[in-house]
Amino acid sequence: MDAASAGRLIGIPFATVTNIREFYPETKAIPKGHLDQQRQDVRSTKAKALDHILQSKKSASNTPHKDVYAGVWDLKHTTYSDQTGRFPYTSHRRNKFVMVMVELDSSAILIEPMKNRSTEELKRA
């Protein structure tokens, strides 16, 4: 309100004292700082609570677990790609698309510009 009454809100249209009083809702004062502290009484340091946690861990370790099976894919000679959409501007070499590929053996990211998304252009890229 002080800035509006002093005329320092020149770049904001309709920022007059009367408009601010009419359209800006009343707000309550809130704490601005000290909200990032850890809440109290979240962790208990009592011996009973620690004993209970240790007992539950011991009983959980005695339960049988299911076997986990993993499969391995041979990714050699396999290519996956995802084509981007058309870019809003055409480059000076008349390219409108970009092909992005990832080669897994060497962790290389390969990028090639394309003029269109035809089959011949995709094979060339």
Image: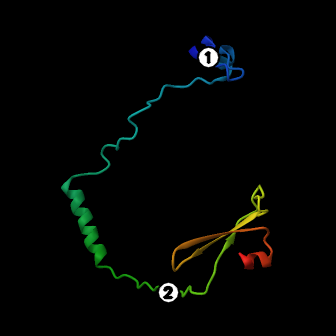
Q: At 32% across and 48% down in the image, what residue appears?
A: 42
Depth order, front residue of 12/20: 12
Measuring from the top left, give residue 73's x and y in whole percent. Answer: 54, 86
10 on left or right of 56? right
Residue contact at pointers 1 and 2, CB within 8 angstroms: no
Q: At 54% across and 78% down in the image, what residue appears?
A: 104
The residue labelled by disc 1 is: 8
Question: Which label belongs to residue 71?
Answer: 2
Mark in front: 1 vs 2: 1
Vertically, is 39 above or below 123? above
Q: Amino acid at mark 1?
A: Arg
Distance from the alpha carbon under mark 1 to that under mark 2: 68 Å
85 on left or right of 64? right
Vertically, is 48 above or below 83? above
Depth order, front residue of 34/120: 120
Q: Quadrant of residue 86?
A: bottom right
Q: Amino acid at mark 2?
A: Gly
Q: Earlier in the sequence, mark 1 or mark 2?
A: 1
